[in-house]
Amino acid sequence: MGKRHLAVLILVLLTLTACSISKTDEKKIRDIEFTVLDKEDIPEEFTLRIEEAKEEPVKLSYADKGYLYIARGYGVKKTSGYSVNVSRCYETEQRVHINTSLLGPGKEEKILKKKTYPYVVVKMEYTDKPIEFD
């Protein structure tokens, strides 16, 4: 094996080792209890921030009175019928992870040709950890 091959092999092994170290730092500590809010239950100031940014995909957070509010929006869509699903919300030692997905209109659903801005807001106990949108 030449020096060049050996150097590449060492680099690959170091990269793989570094990846495994960072993965262990992100081990789930616990699931986080959260509530998906109706639009009328979102704090007014946070609603204004979402409205200002809703044309583009958004990832926002807002803290108020011991709670953390997290919004994930998917920007403007040309029709109605979209919704956002929250599949996971958990905590690691370093951060809060939230996993959402955009769901398209159902086959049986009546679809209107109008702009919509699908987003979801969840409410949870306050934490100062950074948020990772998965």
Image (cartoon, rainbow, N blue to C red):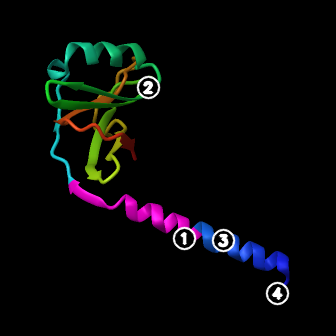
**Amino acid at the residue labelled 4:** Met
**Amino acid at the residue labelled 2:** Gly
Mark 3, mark 2: which one is toward the viewer? 3
Quarter occupied by the N terminus:
bottom right
Tell me the tag on residue 1: 4
Q: Are marks 4 and 1 in contact (CB under 8 Å)?
A: no
Q: Earlier in the sequence, mark 4 or mark 2?
A: 4
Residue 46 spot, x, y in % from top left = 27, 18
**In percent of the image, x 19 and y 35: which residue is there?**
126
Give the Cα separation between the discs numbered 3 and 4.
15 Å
Q: Secondary structure at mark 3?
A: helix
Q: Which residue has dot 2 on it?
A: 75
Residue 22 spot, x, y in % from top left = 46, 61
The answer to if 17 sits in the magenta stretch is: yes
Q: Earlier in the sequence, mark 3 or mark 4?
A: 4
**In percent of the image, x 34 and y 16: which residue is there?**
49
Mark 1, mark 2: which one is toward the viewer? 1
Give the Cα separation between the discs numbered 3 and 2.
39 Å
Residue 29 falls in image quadrant:
bottom left
Q: Which residue has dot 3 on it?
A: 12
Q: Earlier in the sequence, mark 3 or mark 2?
A: 3
In the image, residue 7 above or below residue 65: below
The answer to if 48 sits in the magenta stretch is: no
Q: Secondary structure at mark 4?
A: loop
In the image, residue 59 above or below residue 97: above
Q: Which residue has dot 1 on it?
A: 17
**In percent of the image, x 31 and y 36: which residue is there?**
84
**Amino acid at the residue labelled 1:** Thr
